[in-house]
Image (cartoon, rainbow, N blue to C red):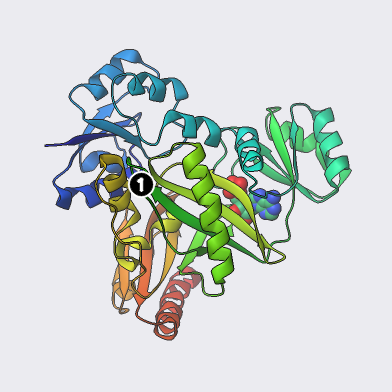
Amino acid sequence: MTTIGVLGGGQLGRMLILAGAPLGLRFRVLDHTADAPAGRLAELVVGDFTDPATLDRFAAGLDLVTLEFENVPLGAARSLAERLPVYPPPRALEVAQDRVREKRCFQELGIPTPDWRPAESASELRKGVAELGLPVIAKTQRLGYDGKGQRVLRSEADVGPTWDQLGGRPLIVETLVPFEREVSILAVRCRHGKAAHYPLVENVHEHGILRRSQAPALYATGELQVQAQNYAKKLLEALDYVGVLAIEFFVHGGRLLANEMAPRVHNSGHWTIEGAETSQFENHLRAILGWPLGSTAPRGHSVMYNLIGTLPPMAPVLRIEGTHVHLYGKAPRPGRKLGHITVRADDAETLEARVQALQESMNRFEAK
Ligand code: AMP
């Protein structure tokens, strides 16, 4: 039986395991906490990713390794890659872990981005602000996620406090784009080089955290889809990528500006579990195993809502036709992703009615 090692035991790992079960796959998870959501569905190794003995214990008897969060210490991924196939390749992690490297990679491949400058000090931040013009957004170069480690600057007086609030760490400063919409594409490339793409998804973020995704993105023109696919193709090939890769874009003036990429299955692809012929999780597994990829065609229309911080009562939600609930088994905490709901329908109008019913049910809960 094939055993896949997963670096990270969060909900993405958990959903990979759920997709792998019908394929007869076994999993072992490495996480630094004993209550990792994926650890309840597979063998769990608890330990530090940088500890060689922990990595030995994790790697023993595995057939290959994948990951479910991009901040896996690079040394750990490289050390495992010396003895086992590791997909996606550590090089993709290296690029995605550092916002400056990532933006340079986009630039080298001709993928447009918002204007940006690196800022290694408060005075470089001031210079960057002057060159780009206000408003801007400053982000830590490394270890930022879900809107953490970023601040919007609207006046020159914000420079000093922002530098201090973000911990005096190397930053990237970007033009704050007055985007029309945010979209993402999920692409997947197999060990043998064959690639596929899901349709563009429209995303709504609140406080930097993904709140809602709609797939396929209703307004997205064929032209935008082709553009996104071309950019994804360039990245997949340049990084010799294997697995699912997500790229997030702003739509500004009718064109795409790349914000960031995630070298893993992605929250904006959760709708694919019920809303596509083959889920992103199954296709990631097929890709890393060198199996044929499954169809990425959507099954009607889907909207996915993240459940953040608290959980509404599930019975009223489940009563709405076409809803699918996924809970990750995590303790509630403000700002924490605890689960998601996908609503699916064969056509956009029926979906809209179901989404309205869901929203009313959630509003009733929030109003209490
Ligand atoms: P990130 O962590 O880079 O994905 O940023 C989280 C969210 O912050 C994005 O999805 C946007 O909603 C917002 N954001 C980030 N960068 C920019 C930017 N350059 N211009 C406008 N909004 C941004």
In the picture, measured across the screen, residue 239 lies left or right of residue 299, that is right
* Foreground of the two, 38 or 254: 254
Instruction: Name, please, the residue furthest toward the top.
Output: 53
Q: Is residue 14 visible?
A: no
Pinpoint residue 69: horizontal percent, then vertical percent: 42, 38
Pinpoint residue 107: horizontal percent, then vertical percent: 66, 41
Vertically, is 123 above or below 56? below
Pinpoint residue 289: horizontal percent, then vertical percent: 25, 41
Identify which residue is drawn at 33% across, 35% down. Answer: 66
Q: Quadrant of the N terminus?
A: top left
Q: Quadrant of residue 269?
A: bottom left
Q: Quadrant of residue 56?
A: top left
Pinpoint residue 351: horizontal percent, then vertical percent: 41, 80
Q: Is mark 1 within 8 Å of ligand 1?
A: no
Q: Quadrant of residue 306?
A: bottom left
Disc 1 is placed on an element classified as helix
Q: Is residue 158 visible?
A: yes
| Residue with the mark numbered 1 | 12
Vertically, is 244 above or below 268? above
Vertically, is 293 above or below 88? below
